[in-house]
Amino acid sequence: MGMSRPREAAAPRHFPQLNRELPDPQPRTIKAHLQWDMAGLLCGTKRRKQVSDLQEEGKNAINAPLQPSSTEVLPEDTLLEENAERTMLDPTSRDSPKFKELQMVLMDWINHELKDERIIVKDLEEDLYDGQVLQKLFEKLSGRKLNVAEVTQSEIGQKQKLQRVLETVNELLRPHGWAIEWSVDAIHSKSLVAIVYLLVALVVHFQAPIRLPEQVTVQVVVVKKREGILHTSHVTKGLTSTTEMMMGRFERDAFDTLLDHAPDKLNVVKKSLITFVNKHLNKLNLEVTELESQFADGVYLVLLMGLLEDYFVPLYNFFLTPESFEQKVHNVAFAFELMQDVGLKKPKARPEDVVNLKLKSTLRVLYNLFTNYKDAE
């Protein structure tokens, strides 16, 4: 066997790509400059747009009180006839806590008044616009039956019912100085402001036993069409004032005159009423010496009604020893219900006023009993 030849060393391999000279960096620098210039141009444009947007936003903020937002002008407003106008509630006012509280108080009141009708109002705009609930509410408050169709589905029928209800309401309220801030079209178009105005008027006129939030105001947008162009303006509407001012709308009666101008005669009336109530309360070994304070918790009123009508009032129906304001109001309101159950008119006084030691309110309640039971043994 011969010896093998040694292998020759392999020639060194060359990697020209590694030995290649780096290209002139100048082209890359030019490209980079172009990129930076373009970025600067874009940033400048963006900054100018931001500045422009800020200027526009500032202008809109300044002009906002003078013109409605885009959400306020509804499509149907463009259909307004020449010289016609439409009002809308400003969105900010709609979200006002006091305005929401007022709506809740009104809904609770309506639901309480119409509980026997099994009517539950959850939304003033959606539940009152067709006149059905307003009809039932007015009939309950006034004791009058309106000659209108019970259920109407058509728009014409609903407006006819509203027309009849509002005519009757206006006839009742207008002589007492109420400004009519509602209309058939406004209520049927679900104007919340018009609906609330009407309900507040009913609350005050019929002396509803509720306390409305005071000084509730809203902003409304008034849209008017002049020469084919819509013009808008903002108007502030006061829905409630102070409780004292609202209660002052009631028609003055003999007790107003008595308290204001004849204090000597007032004492005579008080003595007569004390004699009347003690004649009956003495049967339970009870005696009254001070009208406004001793009737303020409602206990004596409830017991007095039982004595006058000769029945026993179950103790679970009222608080015999009321401690809170709410318990006292419950007692007085319960006594008022007992009065109405036997056919007496609903007392003009509010339970809260009797509890708050308002002499005039207590006198009205007791005088109503005196005129109906003065000959009772």
Image (spheres, rainbow, N blue to C red):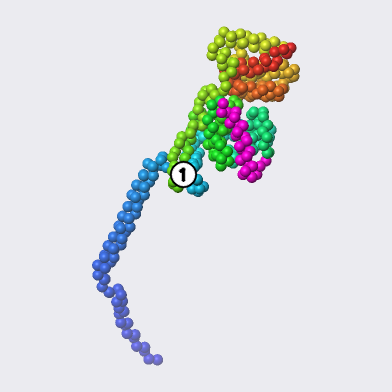
Is 155 contained in the magenta span? yes
| Residue at 27% across, 62% down | 33
Q: Which residue is mark 1?
A: 225
Q: From which residue to which does the magenta span run?
A: 151-175
Q: How many numbered discs sit on the rendered protein?
A: 1
Classify 10 Å Cα crowding around label 1: few (below 14), some (14-19), many (20 and above). some
Q: Does the magenta stretch mainly form a helix, a strand or a loop?
A: helix
Would you say 19 lies left or right of 315 here? left
Residue 40 at x, y percent in the picture: 30, 57
Above or below — where is 165 with respect to 10?
A: above
Residue 123 at x, y percent in the picture: 58, 39
Residue 51 at x, y percent in the picture: 33, 49
| Residue at 59% across, 29% down | 171
Q: Which image quarter: residue 159?
A: top right
Quarter of the picture containing the C terminus is top right
Q: Which image quarter: residue 272?
A: top right
